[in-house]
Amino acid sequence: MLTTLTLLTLAAQAAPTPQFHKDIVPILQARCQSCHRPGEAAPFSMLTYKDTRPWAKAMKAAVAARKMPPWFADSATGHFRNNPTLPQKEIDTLSQWADNGAPEGNPADAPKPLAFTNGWNIGQPDAVFEMPTAFEVPAKGSVDYQWIVIPTGFKEDKWLEAVEVRPGDRSVVHHVIAFYRRPGSKWLADAPPGVPVPKASNSSETGMSDGSIGGYVPGLPPRALGKGRALLLPANSDLVLQLHYTASGKAAKDQTKVGIIFAKQAPKERHIGIAVGNGKFVIPPGDPNYRVDGEITLGADLRVLDFTPHMHLRGKSYEYTAIFPDGREEKLLSVPKYDFNWQLTYELAEERVLPKGTRIHATAYFDNSPNNPFNPDPKAEVRFGDQTWDEMMVGFFSVAVPPDFNLRNLIQQAPPKPPATGAGGR
Ligand code: HEC
């Protein structure tokens, strides 16, 4: 026994201290540099030893606490192919490196630097739509959401295989969603094309978008569907960009653009976004744990691809559960600690066909108490709305259907609910 222990201790002592170029760079390339490099979302670069070295201790702390890379799904529920969580071995390597003075080692041991595209990540687009003029973001203060209508001029339906939304200046772009609206839509009907309009609403009172083709959120790769799948952009639609800017301390200009690649062949499947949510809740002032539920019933056998829960600053947790026609229940995604700053999409490692009649049930909790550091106003009664001081309870998810699928069959009409027990209670 003693000998074994001694040997183990010796072995531990003999393990060489991890070196930056040899041991750390491969981890950073695989897990961190997508965001931690110049021009991207993260506050410092991890491309060189000089830039990385001062952050060694903070890096150790961030990975040990699993704050970085950002990921919020409970690991006990489902498997997701874009889960970036570090294996324990890599956390240990980063920790030992930080604890031992973060040595550089020999630059010759480093793997080849990753080649980052400064152009389009999806490849050369077939069509590009750009904001006609730059939006000026002030150095300080909050900026209302901006909405800008950009006509496509496409006279016929288009199948889109890849879409990339590229901000002009990532230091001030919090997120962008590229919606579309069909001809004749009342949504933003008064907005002159090409001119940003502040504060416009995406709520049912003023009309609604007809869907989105993509978006930009820090660190998320652009949408490239693959597998013979494509999004349908109906003829004569306009794009409507929703732009959320955040002041960075320096005045800046942003001119965001959207690049599109058309499917070269007729797609095998159509990629469609669905949402399960609730727009009728009222969160009481000060409530630390207010529950809101939403549910839809699938109108056909549907192949489910991914989930994107969306709430605002009072959002606490979000769960999707499938309730099968035979009554069996299965949790599909659980995000126990929702964070508004990270609008992540969770892509199923194995796509699932859920049978017709399956109910997709979503449950969210909100913290409207003063203990929520992000709460803009704990005294407010909070309803659905698109400003960050309003709330949302939307569980987006994507499905793949045959190209000629009749969208009316996507969701079953909800059965009439008994009074006073609807969603929004506890
Ligand atoms: C998806 C993008 C993304 C990835 C991947 C990512 N980071 Fe970050 N990181 C950020 C952003 C944005 C911030 C600043 C905001 C914040 O702190 O939440 C940040 C902040 C940090 C900080 C600052 C201190 C802190 O904890 O707030 C550290 C340290 C850090 N990241 C380490 C890492 C390491 C190590 C990796 C890889 C193992 C990594 N990050 C991967 C985007 C990313």
Image (spheres, rainbow, N blue to C red):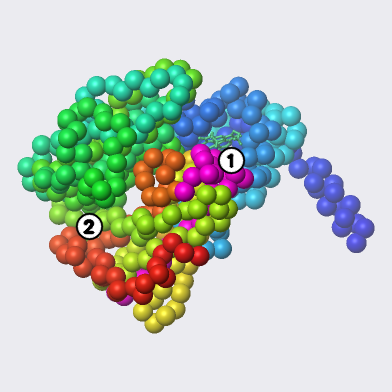
**Viewer-proximal residue among 146 and 32:** 146
Q: Position of residue 406 (x, y in %)?
A: 16, 64
Q: Residue farthest to the right?
A: 2
Quarter assignment of residue 325 = bottom left
Left or right position of 385 against 163: right
Q: Position of residue 311 (x, y in %)?
A: 44, 49
- Residue position for label 2: 270
Where are the magenta residues, as a range?
353-381
Quarter assignment of residue 229 = bottom left
Any mark on residue 159, and which?
none
Q: Position of residue 306 (x, y in %)?
A: 38, 57
Residue at left offset 39%, top offset 28%: 143
Any mark on residue 373, and which?
1
Is label 1 in a helix, a strand or a loop?
A: loop
Quadrant where the N terminus sits is bottom right
Disc 2 under 8 Å from ligand 1? The reply is: no
379 in magenta: yes
Decide: is 187 above or below 292. above
Amino acid carrying mark 2 in the image: Arg
Residue at left offset 92%, top offset 58%: 2
Separation of residues labelled 2 and 1 (CA atoms): 41 Å
Left or right position of 211 against 44: left
Residue at left offset 11%, top offset 45%: 184
Residue at left offset 34%, top offset 20%: 136
Amino acid carrying mark 1 in the image: Pro
Total marks drawn?
2
